[in-house]
Amino acid sequence: MDEFIKLLDKDLKYLNHKIVDDMIYIYVVSTRNEVTCPFCGHKSLKTHSTYERSFQDFPMQGKKVQIIIKNRKMFCNNPECDHTTFAERFDWLGNKSKKTKRLEDEIMHMSLNCSSTAAANFLSKNTVTVGKSTICNLLKKRKTDNK
Ligand SMILES: [Zn+2]
């Protein structure tokens, strides 16, 4: 399982997992030493606190995968920065997103070739929880990003 998690990010560490019905919950933690402040670019080594953040990733063994990360809140000790703390962010996960970018990409890919309703139906059968509205929002978001 640790290897699987490292495919997503080599700085993630697998803690444990549990299987409940058709869901696999995977608990992970980030082991990156230095975390870059997204507001000023300074690197921080000092953790302020942690909180749980969960998001969906590719299904495994026909089960939905929900990853729960102990997300770190770091101190920014740059006196010039407007923020004293910031949450660790990841390239592969949108700031407020509930799905990994690779899963969003897959959903997008599906949706470009059929209607949102058909894509939602297909994806649900393939054990990804996604509603028609989520797909529409993703499509809108991507269109805005590309402008
Ligand atoms: Zn900062």
Image (cartoon, grey):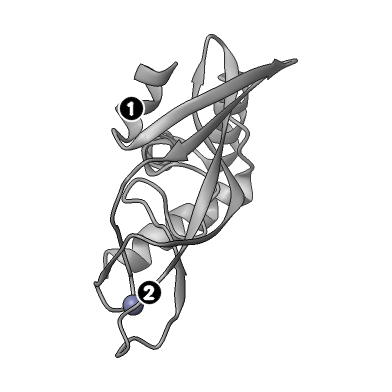
The foreground one among 107 and 26 is 26
| Quadrant of the image occupied by residue 113 | top left
| Residue at x-position 31% and y-position 26% | 7
Report whether residue 106 is seen.
yes
| Most distant residue in the top direction | 61
- Residue under label 2, please give it: 76
Compare marks 1 and 2 and give the one earlier in the sequence. 1
Q: Is residue 80 left or right of residue 47?
A: left
Work out whether 133 lies above or below 75: above
Please state, as top left, top right, bottom left or bottom right, where the N terminus lies in the image: top left
Residue 143 locus on image (x, y percent):
35, 62
Instruction: Please state the total of marks drawn on the protein image.
Output: 2
Q: Is mark 2 within 8 Å of ligand 1?
A: yes
Residue 111 locus on image (x, y percent):
44, 39
Residue 131 locus on image (x, y percent):
64, 42
Residue type at the position of mark 1: Lys
Report whether residue 127 is seen.
no
* CA distance separating discs 1 and 2: 27 Å
Residue 6: image tag: 1
| Residue at x-position 33% and y-position 69% | 37
Residue 133: image tag: none
Name the front one of labels 1 and 2.
2
